[in-house]
Amino acid sequence: MVPPTEAPARPARKRKTRGEGQWALGYREPLNANERSKKDDNPLNVRQRIETIYAHRGFDSIDPADLRGRFRWWGLYTQRAPGIPGARTGTIEPEALDDRYFMLRVRIDGGALTTEQLRTVGEISQTYARDTADITDRQNIQLHWVRVEDMPTIWQKLEAVGLSTTEACGDCPRVVLGSPVAGIAADEIVDATPAIKEISERFIGDRSLSNLPRKFKTAISGSPRWDTVPEINDVSLVGVVHPEHGPGFDLWVGGGLSTNPKLAVRLGAWVPLDEVAEVWHGVVQIFRDYGYRRLRHRARIKFLVADWGAEKFRQVLEDEYLGRKLLDGPAPETPAGHRDHIGVHPQADGNFYVGAKSAAGRVSGSTLMAVAKAAERVGSGRIRTTVEQNLLVLDVPKSEVDGLVAELANLGLRSDPSPWRRNVMACTGIEFCKLAIVETKQRAIALVNDLEERLADIQGDVTDPVTINLNGCPNACARTQVADIGLKGQMVPDANGEQVEGFQVHLGGGLGQDAGFGRKIRGHKVTSAELGDYVERLVRRYLDQRAAGERFAQ
Ligand code: SF4
């Protein structure tokens, strides 16, 4: 018998690599529907259509490409129609999820507001948004139940006090995060306020930057506490002292969460305050020109940075965009502990600031107006929002601190919260978000109340923050992967095998000293109803078994 011959080896076929849709490499024809929509019409143009057409003719007159695409460049998302369970998301047409109302995101660069601005947002909320307001973990304020008919008036009122919704969402430079204690903190390295103001005034609404591959998130803080989560922004400038040139910023790029989380990388470059806007502009232009546009899920700058590496990114920035070399600089010292500014703290000028915790970001227009009134009563005209969904009142004289603390507590804003209240965050969730699978805000509020009762006996033993972040889906808007207990919404089986709302648990994520992503542990899925039991078990076990000095994140 003739033995079977082996099949001749085929010459290896060279895999045809498809481009990533980078403009700088010649891919100017749109490669997907999102890119087509942006090319068809600059999304910023939709404002004019809202004012001249849609606000007069109503919701049904809105072009679907504007409704589900370009509206976002003006801070508008359709909110989720009530009563559609999360389990059905993805199995029904997107139109069926659209309510006839909008979420409206008010952009607050640096988290800095005057009391007049806060009162205006509160009034708008009361009049046009059913008194809803959420403080987001990007220092914005988000309203709900907004009608397109009211948008011209809302813009008029916001812009009259110097606020805007320009590029609050969309594939463009979103709100610029800033230290809530910029300009007042005794331990500040450098006050980034002028740089944030320059970026906001020169580049937000700039049509040359309004068609980026995807959203672009910025954090600029001169606080040694890293209070703008620089590890997970697209570009971050982090306060540091250069041994020869003094205070300035360390430049980081490529951080982000969602489904492919990455920590930002240092470029090893030191940037003085008056060059921040120019360098930021260079980084955004790299993203615009070299960012990946073929696939939406690869269109964030973190993928480009991961492929290029820090050295090449810096070289392209210097050679092609700045036309000069940046100075090398030292790494900032990694902070430990709380970054949230909760409590009463002295300012550099002898006054105090009061940081108060909201209930997972949920406030109301009435609450915002009451905060503005309380702040003015004690002589303050300045409010700040934080990336932990909190509010700060600045410039409080010592004699007024106790009264203000009590007044804020009456409004549900605690400056001495329990560890559970202090360290909980929640994204928008199924109440309003079309991508959500589960409820988050009310669940977080109920969880905090529950834990305060269950764990009252050990409250004093929890000395390090144990952060709990509730997210309604894998998108990680409330930073799933960098919480001690990160909760990603999904349907999970209950004890009877029925699919119910619940969470995949990510354990041991953190920022700063403990920077790293939480681990998904097999079997760590919990139903929404069992969340209190689960967290109690976990925290008690940690306290029982921890080694000396061991933090929860370890
Ligand atoms: Fe919506 Fe998901 Fe983001 Fe929550 S994490 S706000 S559910 S997209």
Image (cartoon, rainbow, N blue to C red):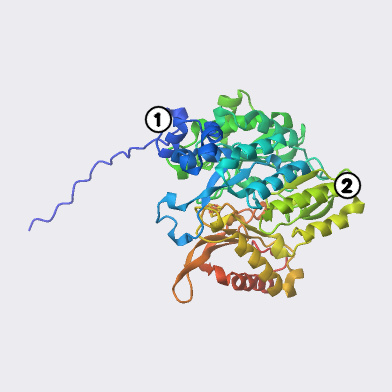
Please tell me which residue lies in front, 176 or 72.
72
> In which image quadrant can residue 431 be found?
bottom right
Residue at 48% over, 68% down:
500
> Is disc 1 placed on a helix, strand or loop?
loop
Disc 2 marks which amino acid?
Answer: Asn
Residue at 70% over, 63% down:
421
Residue 370 at what x, y percent from top left? 77, 52
Q: Is residue 68 left or right of residue 536?
A: left
Disc 1 marks which amino acid?
Answer: Glu
Classify the position of the N terminus by image quarter: bottom left
Q: Is residue 445 left or right of residue 287?
A: right
Q: Please, which residue is most extreme toward the bottom here?
A: 496
Q: Give me the C-alpha separation between circle 1 and circle 2.
A: 57 Å
Q: Please, which residue is most extreme toward the front here?
A: 56
> Is disc 2 placed on a helix, strand or loop?
loop
Residue 265 at what x, y percent from top left? 60, 42
Report if residue 153 is visible in the image: yes
Classify the position of the C terminus by image quarter: bottom right
Q: Which residue is mark 1?
A: 29
Residue 416 at what x, y percent from top left? 79, 61
Do the residues under discs 1 and 2 have CB atoms within 8 angstroms?
A: no
Respond yes or no on whether mark 2 lies under 8 Å from ligand 1. Answer: no
Vertical side of 146 occupied by 30: above or below: above
Q: Please, which residue is most extreme toward the right here?
A: 399
Respond yes or no on whether mark 1 lies under 8 Å from ligand 1. Answer: no
> In which image quadrant can residue 325 be found?
top right
Q: Is residue 116 left or right of residue 64?
A: right
Please tell me which residue lies in front, 144 or 489.
144
Q: Which mark is residue 351?
A: 2
Residue 98 at what x, y percent from top left? 48, 50
